[in-house]
Image: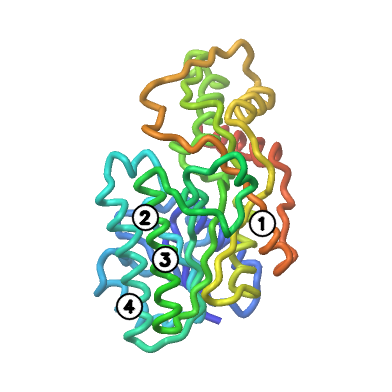
Amino acid sequence: MKVLVTGVTGFVGSHLVDYLLTMSDVEIFGLKRWRSRTENIEHFEDRIALYECDIRDATSVRNAMEEIKPDRIFHLAAQSYVPTSWDSPSSTLETNIMGELNIFESVRKIGIDPLIQVAGSSEEYGLVHQNELPITEGNPLRPLSPYGVSKVCQDMLAYQYFMNYGIKVIRTRAFNHTGPRRPANFVCSDFARQIVQMERGKKPKVIHTGNLDAIRDFTDVRDMVKAYWLSLERGKPGDVYTICSGTGETIKDILDTLVKLSDVNDIEIKQTSTRLRPTDVPVLVCDCVKFRKLTGWKPEIPFEQTLRDILEFWRARI
């Protein structure tokens, strides 16, 4: 079986390949931009086939697809950082929407018939009222960021290509996932890096934060990539599945846990205006009963262990 991972050098893509490498009879291919950093894939780079490809370039995508002819595609490549989408909305929309369109058009024109997982996001739900919790697939989509809008567009584009062309797309709406290798511009990794810098004496004992009251539903990335695999193993083409832990954590609770797991005391917490979003979704907590009934999947890694592993990741690098 030929499995293609777009965005292979990224946080989720690299963990997905780690999981795929535990399987037999799977030939792994990855798409990466020529300027992509490769530290996430150095430990398996010689065990997969890598293709230089910018998903925004239709010709580049089509050439890769014609050569690989994958049986399964995990489409993970994206501009995935919400604050960046306010600074660069046009780039976010182009990368996320046109990149996916180029994949679908290549599949359609070449005439191959892979299963395709499109990685959506909890940000598609955006504004959620209290009486609409926990979130399921039936919740209204009210995105509050350009990133969220781009993901809704990806979601609807996938549905359209399934309905019009029969392309076998499974849509997943994953809630927050984190773990080792998460870039430092994401909240858990950002806090962990600041704490480790304090442990090393490289930073004053002050943590700069954004909104600590937001409630998010976190899953370990190593559990999430197993869910992605199961979405293609057992999911129904054209359908959509929310994937989550089902448990909400305030950002403050996450910070408190990381501090508890550290070797630093008497840390000052300072909210910084530059870390606040123009609009912030107050609560994103999900119920993925539909996906669990279909696949039997559930998270296995306790969240405190995830946070401990993120701290160890930064301790090895600072």
Q: Which residue is drawn at 45% across and 71% down?
A: 159
Left or right: 245, with 36 as reference point: right
**Mark 3 touching mark 2, by CB under 8 A?**
no
Residue at numbered disc 2: 150
Residue at 50% over, 25% down: 194
Residue 130, above or below 207: below
Label 4 amino acid? Glu
Marks 2 and 1, the one that precedes in the sequence = 2
Q: On the image, numbered disc 4 is attached to which residue?
A: 105
Give the mark, 3 or 4, whose residue is nearer the N terminus. 4
**Are the residues tagged 1 and 3 within 8 Å (C-beta)?**
no
Q: In this view, does 159 lie to the left or right of 232?
A: left
From the image, tell me which residue sits under label 1.
Answer: 288
Q: Residue at x 62, y 80 (%)?
A: 25
* CA gap, disc 1 and disc 3: 20 Å
Q: Do the residues labelled 2 and 1 touch (CB within 8 Å)?
A: no
State the residue in front, 314 or 107: 107
Q: Tag on residue 186?
A: none
Q: Say above or below: 85 vs 45.
A: above
Using residue 126 as the reference point, say whether residue 109 is left or right of it: left
Residue sitting farthest toward the front: 131
- Inspect the image, locate mark 2, and give the three-letter code of the amino acid beneath it: Ser
Badge 3 is on which residue?
Answer: 156
In this view, the residue in front, 291 or 71, is 291
Tag 1: amino acid: Cys
For the residue carrying disc 4, how many other residues have a C-alpha within 10 Å: few (<14), some (14-19), or many (20+)? Answer: some
